Image (tube, grey):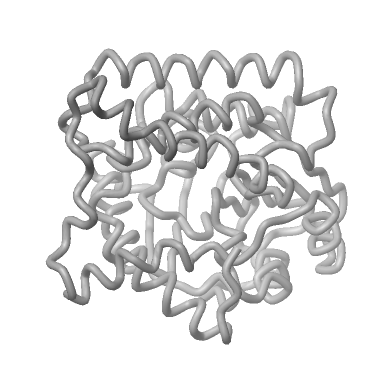
């Protein structure tokens, strides 16, 4: 993970990158708002909250909402009645608003630009604070968790998913590096052209902002890190779980191959193999590995805690 000079620089880099990434973000990461997307998000919630997941939360806040993958799918699944979304990137806020409108959810969704470490909401406002793949972007985690605690009502929950584990992140480098080695042969086999280095004009500000992607990930965590931060800021009933081991290795190997090629040249048959193989290995991880192996070994960590 990258170490930048100051908190302000971290915020600026995240803002610039996510603003230019917003328009193509859903397509790049295969974000889905139909049955598959809802099933993925519900699975994460059930791992952490068990039977509590069946009770809708009246008011929820999403931190670092991106285009809405986590919260809009939760709302479609009936787990959130009223939703407020925040992101440091105006581009992401606009993309989420467009998705909410397209999904028929706009009347119950408000999205605004806000810093996670300085939330513009009153104390004791929400029953749920959620986030997906956001904590590892935040420069001041103590301030952010203090804000999460402040805006939650007593008894309210935080639920964060998709946070990279320190060990899992290192393990993921193996399939990525292997894929880079075989990518030229793979492209020749599929008769796929190499991906262009950038879709932006060389030397342009847009290109420079796209190239900030390698600098926006600031942290990787151990389970103990997340537990300590939550408890230090007043949360109780803290639980951390790991998810995706085999699915992650398989996914990053295939994802790295695909990103090396011109996207229109990747056959649909390959995409179906990669997608369904990933889902199959996800199920294997859940049934055979996640309850048996330490959370630190998995690529993603999930956190929940309660405000007393």
- Left or right of 208, for residue 42: right
Near-viewer residue (71 or 275): 275
From the top left corner, tell me how far across and down residue 290 is, in percent.
76, 25
From the top left corner, tell me how far across and down residue 174 is, in percent.
59, 39
From the top left corner, tell me how far across and down residue 42 is, in percent.
57, 28
Q: Identify the image quadrant of residue 161.
A: top right
Say which quadrant the C terminus sits in: bottom right
Residue drawn 57% across and 85% down? 5
Residue drawn 40% across and 47% down? 68
- Left or right of 104, for residue 47: right
Residue drawn 63% across and 49% down? 163
- Left or right of 235, for residue 38: left
Asked whether residue 240 is in view, the answer is yes
Q: Is residue 103 above or below residue 5?
A: above
Q: Is residue 16 above or below residue 269?
A: below
Residue drawn 51% across and 77% down? 10
Say which quadrant the N terminus sits in: bottom right
From the top left corner, tell me how far across and down residue 90 is, in percent.
32, 68
């Amino acid at each position: 993970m990258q170490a930048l000079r100051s908190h302000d620089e971290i915020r600026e880099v995240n803002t610039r990158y996510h603003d230019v990434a917003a328009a193509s973000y859903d397509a790049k990461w295969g974000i889905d708002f139909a049955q598959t997307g809802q099933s993925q998000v519900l699975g994460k919630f059930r791992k952490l909250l068990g039977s509590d997941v069946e009770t809708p939360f009246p008011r929820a806040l999403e931190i670092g909402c991106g285009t809405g993958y986590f919260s809009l799918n939760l709302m479609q699944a009936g787990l959130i009645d009223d939703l407020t979304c925040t992101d440091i990137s105006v581009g992401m806020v606009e993309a989420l608003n467009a998705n909410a409108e397209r999904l028929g959810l706009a009347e119950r969704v408000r999205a605004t630009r806000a810093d996670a470490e300085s939330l513009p909401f009153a104390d004791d406002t929400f029953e749920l604070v959620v986030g997906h793949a956001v904590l590892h972007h935040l420069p001041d985690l103590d301030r952010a968790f203090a804000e999460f605690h402040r805006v939650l009502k007593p008894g309210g929950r935080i639920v964060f998913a998709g946070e990279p584990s320190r060990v899992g992140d290192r393990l993921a480098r193996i399939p990525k590096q292997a894929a880079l080695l075989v990518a030229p042969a793979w492209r020749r086999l599929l008769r796929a052209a190499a991906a262009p280095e950038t879709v932006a004009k060389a030397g342009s500000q847009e290109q420079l902002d796209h190239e900030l992607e390698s600098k926006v990930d600031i942290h990787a965590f151990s389970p103990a890190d997340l537990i300590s931060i939550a408890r230090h800021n007043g949360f109780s009933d803290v639980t951390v779980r790991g998810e995706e081991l085999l699915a992650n290795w398989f996914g990053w190997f295939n994802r790295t191959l695909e990103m090396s090629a011109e996207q229109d040249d990747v056959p649909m048959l390959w995409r179906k193999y990669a997608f369904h193989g990933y889902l199959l290995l996800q199920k294997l991880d859940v049934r055979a590995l996640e309850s048996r192996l330490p959370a630190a070994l998995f690529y993603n960590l999930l956190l929940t805690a309660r405000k007393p």
